[in-house]
Image (cartoon, rainbow, N blue to C red):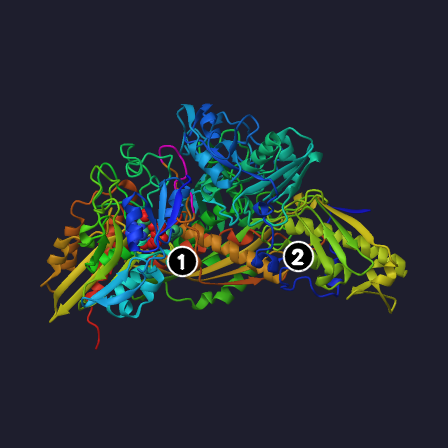
Amino acid sequence: MTAFHKMDEPDHRNRLDAMVQGVLGTGMDRPDGPEKVTGSATYAHDGQVAGMLHGVMVRATIAKGRLEHIDAQAVEALPGVRAVLHGDRFLRNPAQGTANEAPVQGSRDIAYLGQPVALVVADRFEQARHGAQSVTLRYSEESASVAPDAETAEVPDKKQSSAGDLAAAMDRAAFCVDAVYTTPGHNSAAMEPHAAIAAWEGDLLTVRASCQMLKYNVNELADALGVDPEHVRILSPFVGGGFGSKLGISPETVAAALAARALGQPVAVALSRQQVFEATMRRSETRQHIRLAADAEGRLTGIGHEALVSNLEGEDFSEPVTQATPFLYRGENRLIGHRISRVNRTCAGSVRAPGEAVGVTALEIAMDELATAAGIDPVDLRRRNIPERDPGEDRPFSSHMLRAALDDGAAAFGWENRPQGGARQGDWLAGCGMSSASRVNMIGKSSARVTLHPDGTALVETDMTDIGTGTYAILNQIAAEMLGLPPARVKVRLGDSDLPKSAGSGGSWGASSAGSSVFLACERIRQDIAERCGCDEGTLTLKDGMAIADNRARPLAQVLAGAPLQAEGEIDKGKTSEAVRQATFGAFFAEVAVNAVTGETRLRRMHGSFAAGRILNAKTARSQCLGGMTFGIGMALTEELIHDPRDGHIVNHDLAEYHLPVNADVPQLSVNLLEERDPWANPMQAKGIGELGICGAGACIVNAIHDATGIRVRHLPATLDKLLEGLDRLDDLG
Amino acid sequence: MRSFHYERAADTPDAVAACAAGATIIAGGTNLLDLMKREVVQPERLIDITRLDLRTIESAEGGLSIGALVSNSDLAAHRDVRRDWPVLAQALLSGASGQLRNKATTGGNLLQRTRCYYFQDSAMPCNKREPGSGCHALGGATRLHAILGGSDACIATHPSDMAVAMTMLDASLDIIGKDGASRRLRLRDFYRLPGDTPHIETVLQPGDLIAKVVLPPPAGGRQTYRKVRDRASYAFALVSVAARIELAEGRIADASLAFGGIAPRPWHDPAVDRLLVGEVPSAALFARVADVLLDGAAPQEGNAFKVPLLRRTLTATLNELCREIPQ
Ligand SMILES: Cc1cc2nc3c(=O)[nH]c(=O)nc-3n(C[C@H](O)[C@H](O)[C@H](O)COP(=O)(O)OP(=O)(O)OC[C@H]3O[C@@H](n4cnc5c(N)ncnc54)[C@H](O)[C@@H]3O)c2cc1C
C-alpha cells in the first residue's frame, strides 16, 4: 500500500498545523543523542567483525603519469601482510553526488598526487599501514597542470546565461563595482574519517560504510565491482558528518569490497586524516569576476558573475558558484559565466553547500562594496533590490523571505545602534558587517515505510541517513505528530539500503524529501484509522495513542484490534520545482575586532535570521545554522587548502594545519528562525535548512573587517598577512 | 609505523643505559608517536621515561628547577612560575590544547620536531628527514617557515613556544650523558642552525637525557609573551615575541628578547638586547632594534609577510612593556 504524491501543485492544506500531538517543531532532543555521547553508536569502523583483516591504501606520489610497477613481493613478505591489491576496479576518486554509477576506475593512470593506487591488507592495522608505507611504486611521469588556468579552461553549455546588455549598464551606472574575488579550496573535514568494512556471504556483499545517499551508493558500488545491485547491502546507521564528502561511494569502500572478495575474509579500510584530505572531495578554489551596476538610488540595473573553477579531467561536477545569482537581486542586465579548468589536483566535488557557500559570499562582499560606493546602508541596499519575480527566469517565487530576514536580523543584532566602525579599544579596531543568505530549495524522490503496531507504537523505516543533522529526531516527530503518539513510542530505523529508498542526505533536501515520505505514509494510516472509526480523515483526531472521532475516543490498540497497520509513502519532485523559484533566505550580522598591530581578526558576535519554511525541530534546525555560521567563520578567516605550486598536492592535509575554527574562534552566535510555510515545497511546507547558514556567512565578517579598518579583502581567507599593508597605511594616517 | 621494542625505565641509570644503547626516549609521546605513525622517524627501540622521578618543580640556586617530565599544564599553573616568570606560563598556555598540554612534557617540548609540511610527509624530499634528499620547502609552501637562520639545505622553524620564553629567560639544561655524568648547558647554546646538516638539531650527544631545566633567579621589570597566529587557539606561531624590559628613571636598564616562528631555533640576538639597554624608549629606538633584528632576513615568497609582522609585533610588545604603569 503506497501513498504516492508528486509535487505538481502547491499543497495549501497545511495538514500538519491541524495535528494536535504538539511535538513537531519543538526542540526535542535527539533520540540518538545518548548513544552518541556514550560511544555506543556504531559508526562504520566500529562494526568490527570476527576474523576481519585490515587494509590501508597506498597513494600515488606524482601528480600525473602511469603506474608502471608495484613492488608487491617485498611488501607481501612483511609480517602479517596478506596481499597487495590493485587493478582496474579501484576508484581514482569518489563518485559525485547522485552519480548512480562508478566514477573513473583503474590504478594505472594517475591524475593527482594522493590518488589511491593500491591496498595493502594485513592481519593487523599497524602491519597494513607499515606495508602501505613500504610499497615502492615505479612510474612514467608526465607533465601535470597543477594550477587552474583561465586561458585553457573549458566553457560548458550549462551555467551560462545573459540578458540585456551588462556592459552598457555598467557604463550608465551611477555606482558600480567591478572586481575579482577568490576563494581557496576547502575540505569537508567531517569528524569521522571515511571508512568501510566489507564482508561477502557467497555473492552477497554487506558493507558498513560512512555514506550519505544509500540508494545511489548501492548502485555505484555494484557498478564499480561489476555485480548486481540486488546483491549489495550498505549499512550506515550513524555517519559522523558528511558535508558532501560522503555523497558518492569512495575509494576505500570499493577497495574493502574487492579485498574481502579476493581474500575470502571481511576487510576493513579506514582512511587516515591525511588521506581524507588527499583522496576525498575538495571544494574547488574559485575565481569570481563580479560586476554590479546601480542607479543613483542604489537599485541594481546590472549583475555580472563569472566564475572559474577546476576539476580533474573527466569529472562532470563543477562548483556551481553562481547558483543563487540569477534570482537573489533585481537588475535587468545580467551575465552569468562559468569556466572549468582541468587540473591534476584532488577531485573537486560537493563540499558544504556547493555553489552558494562561496558564490553568495563573494557576491555579498561585492554588495558591501556597492553600499560603500553609493553611501547607502548595506541592509537598506539589499532591501531596495529584492525582486518581485525571479528575474533570471521570469517566474514567481514560492516565497521570498529576504526582507523579513533582514528586518528581523537587524533588530536582533541592534544594527541601528552598532558601534562606530573603526572605534579603537587598545590595539583593537571594532567593525560591523552584514550579508544576505540564500540557497536553492530542492526535493528528491523518497520513500519510507511506517508501521503502526497494535500496542500503539510505531516504526518508521527508510534508507535515509542521519549525518549528524537530526534525521532520527525529525522523522520521529513527524510520525508522532501525524499518528498522535508520544515520541517515546516511535522508533526510527535508518541507514540500511534494504529499507525503502530515500533521497538521502545532501543538498539540504533530506528533511523535505524523507520527511514528506513519512508524512504521506502516516496520512495513509490515518485514512485507514478514519475508515475504521467511520469518519472522514480530515475530522479524525489522533492524540496520545487515542483515536478521537465523532466525540468518541478509543485507544488505538482497540481500533487496530491486534493487527498492525502499515503503509509506504513516496514523494517525488514535480511541476512545482519548475513553476516557481524555490529558495531559502536569511541575513547575517557580525561584529569583529581587528588587531591594528598584527592584523589578527577576532569575531566578537554573530547573528543569523533564517527562513526555511516550517521548522521541524527548533533545536536541530538551530544547530544546523550554528554549524553553517561556524563554517562561515572558517571561510572568512582561516580555512584554506594549500596546494604545492609544483605538484598540486595538498600540503596542509591535517587538522593542525588546515585551520577549522576552534572554540576560541567562535564567540556567541545567535539564531532566529522565522515562521514560514511554503506550500510549493512539499506537503509539510518545510524547506531545506542544512546549508543555508553557510551561504554568504563569511561575507558579513569580511565586510565587518572593512568597517573596522577600511581594508577590503577580496581574497579569502582574510588572514592577517592580507591586512598588514593596509594597516601600515592606517598607521601613517593615525 | 615500523615494529619497535618498547621498554619502561625504572630509574634514571636504567634510562641512561638504554639511551646509551641507542634507544629513543618517549615521554608524553604527543610528537613522537605522530611522527612514528607516518614513518617520519622510525626508532627501533623506545625507552619510556615517564616513571622516572623527574616531575618536581622546586626552588634551586635562587631560581627554579623543573624536572624534564613536568607536564606543560602543571608548569603553566605553578604558583612560582606565574608570579616570577609569567612569560613562561603565558607561552605554555598559548601552545597546543589543554589535552595536549596535560600530556606534553618539558623535555619533550624542547625536542619537538618542526611542523614543516615537507618534513612531516615521508614521500617528500627533506634534508632533515633524509640527509641529502633536498629541501622541498624551498620553492614550495612556506607560510610556516624561517626568515632568519635558514640555509640552502633547510628553512624549517622550531615550533615550540615554551622554548622561546625559556630562551629569553636564559634557562639552562641539566643533561645526563651516557657515562651517567650530569652537565649543564645554556639553552641559548643548545639548538644548532641547520647549515648543511639540518638533521642535527641540537648539541645533544647520542645517549643524552635531559633531566632538568633550570631558570635563573627572577629578574626585574615586566615580561610578556605575544604570539601571533592564524586562529585564536591551537595553531603554531607565525611570529612570537618573548620580552622582558626593566626600566629605571625613564631608561631601559635591562632587556631580554627572544623570538619564535621565524627561525630554525628560538631566536635570540644579543645585539638586540644590547641596543636597548641604557636607552630612552622611543619609536625610533624600536625601529632601529627591528632593523638590527631583521638584518639578514631571507624570506620566501610565502612568508615575506613575517618581516613586517615581526617588526610590528616587536614594536607593539616593546611599547606595551615600556608604557608607564600607573602606581
Ligand atoms: C596538534 C598539535 C598542536 C600543537 N601546538 C603547539 C603549539 O602551539 N606550541 C607548542 O609549543 N607546541 C605545540 N604542540 C607540540 C607539543 O607541545 C609537543 O608535542 C609536546 O610538547 C611534546 O612533548 P612530549 O612529552 O609529548 O614529547 P614526546 O613526543 O614524548 O617526545 C618528543 C621528542 O623529545 C624527546 N625527548 C622527550 N623527553 C626527553 C628527555 N627528557 N630527554 C631527551 N629527549 C627527550 C623524544 O625522544 C622525542 O624525540 C602541538 C602538538 C600538536 C600535536
Name the residue nearer the viewer: A713 or A348.
Answer: A348
Name the spot of residue A630 as percent of width and height, x first: 48, 55
Q: Does residue A526 sit above or below A217 in this rendering? A: below
Q: What is the number of callouts on the image? A: 2
Residue type, mark 1 in image: Ala
Q: Is residue B230 visible?
A: no
Q: How far apart are labels 2 and 1 at the CA level? A: 36 Å
Q: Is residue B216 covered in magenta?
A: no
Q: Residue at x 90, y 60 (%)?
A: A534
Q: Residue at x 53, y 50 (%)?
A: A329
Name the spot of residue A308 as percent of width and height, x first: 45, 37
Q: Is residue A646 covered in magenta?
A: yes
Name the residue nearer the viewer: A187 or A400.
Answer: A187
Disc 2: CA contacts within 10 A as few (<14), some (14-19) or many (>=20): many
Q: Does residue A462 sit above or below A120 in this rendering? A: below
Q: Quadrant of the C terminus of chain B?
A: bottom left
Mark number, residue A474: 2
Q: Does residue B134 sit above or below A211 in this rendering? A: above
Disc 1: CA contacts within 10 A as few (<14), some (14-19) or many (>=20): many
Q: Is residue B260 visible?
A: yes
Highlighted range, magenta: A645-654
Mark number, residue A704: 1
Name the spot of residue A179 as percent of width and height, x first: 40, 44
Mark number, residue A434: none
Q: Does residue A500 sit above or below B255 in this rendering? A: above
Residue lying farthest bottom? B327
Q: Earlier in the sequence, mark 2 or mark 1?
A: 2
Residue lying farthest left? B278
Q: Is residue A427 left or right of residue A394?
A: left
